[in-house]
Image (spheres, coloured by chain):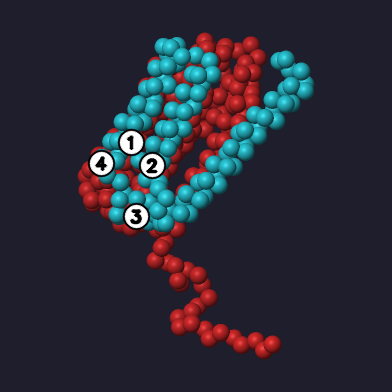
Chain colours: A red, B cyan
Amino acid sequence: MDYVAEPIPEGYTGYVEEEHHHDYAGDTVFGFWVYILSDCILFATLFAVFAVIGENYYGAPDAHELFELDYVLGETALLLFSSFTFGMAMLAANVDNMRGLLQWLGATWLLGFGFLVMEVNEFIHFTHEGAAAWSSGAWSAFYGLIGTHGLHVFAGMIWMVFLVFQLRQGGLTMKNRTRLMCLSLFWHFLDIIWICVFSVVYLMGVM
Amino acid sequence: MSEHSPGGAAHGSVKEYVNGLLLSLVLTAVPFAIVMSGAVSGPAAVGVVLLCAVGQVFVQLIFFLHMNTSSEQMWNVTSAVFVVVLVAILIVGSIWIMNHLNHNMLMGH
């Protein structure tokens, strides 16, 4: 059979970007979403490790002796309200209210900072009580899981500082809106991970 | 919700965020109250804690992350469902295998 070449369409360059570059921001946000999903797998492995060796205390104090649920409730509240204030920041950004955006981001940052201070304080307290990261398999799994979440919160706070500088310099450009959208996904995601942490590690730990 | 930003993510409204916050507060208060008061114990308490956790994850996905089943979000939701399957295999599989291993090694039994 004879092969008949199709006529090349008008404006065809062979590069996919030529056809899709208008959707650049959407691709970025979707790509970031895929990163967050891959982070879910990271946390899933840490939860699996905790589920498997989370009770191998090897003589170190156990969860019943150390966990204080009202303290954890405080941490939970800080993170939940920070997720809400980030939502308010997004609404301010949608109506081009730069002042409101920066104020809500500031509130979010302070709530995140409060959460981290409480968490580090808890780690120091536990370590003094004999439950250090190197004391037993259970505590290694505990610090591995919760420390990784805390590092993510810390990274989000650094990112927020940089984003505020970028917003003050460039205003609410399309690029900055995309960055803001990615950080908001990241921040809400961290609160969702924390729901699993307080339910599985703290609440089920003292049962 | 009519407006959508890049990536199929919807914008949301104050009402939506407030509703999400209130539901999250309830779904946080219930498991903490049950465990701290000791009103319910055993498998029932585990069940309530897990149900509230799953409920709150969905509340935040819907009210804070504005996930829905619209066509703009098809790839976001499809990829998320795929990851949920991976996470389930990872966690359930690990617990299952290691329990059998412990059992065969006569550890703790």
Q: Secondary structure at mark 1?
A: helix
* Residue type highlighted by circle 4: Val
The one nearer the camera, A202 or A179, is: A202
Relative horizontal placement of residue A144, taking residue A19 as reference (left or right): right
Q: Are marks 2 and 1 in contact (CB under 8 Å)?
A: yes
Q: Chain of mark 3?
A: B
Residue at mark 2 to residue at mark 4: CA–CA distance: 14 Å
Residue A149 left/right relative to B30: right
Q: Which mark is residue B14?
A: 4
Residue B55 seen from this side: yes
Choose mark 3 or mark 1, whichever is in front: 1
Graded by Cα atoms within 10 Å as few (under 14), some (14 to 19) or many (20 or more), the crowding at tag 1 reads many
Picture residue at 46% right of the left edge, 51% below the top: B76
The kind of residue on which mark 1 rests is Gly
Q: Position of residue A196 (x, y in %)?
A: 48, 30
Q: Which chain contains the residue that carries disc 2? A: B
**Circle 4 crowding by C-alpha within 10 Å: few under 14, some 14–19, many from 20:** few
Residue identifier under label 2: B62
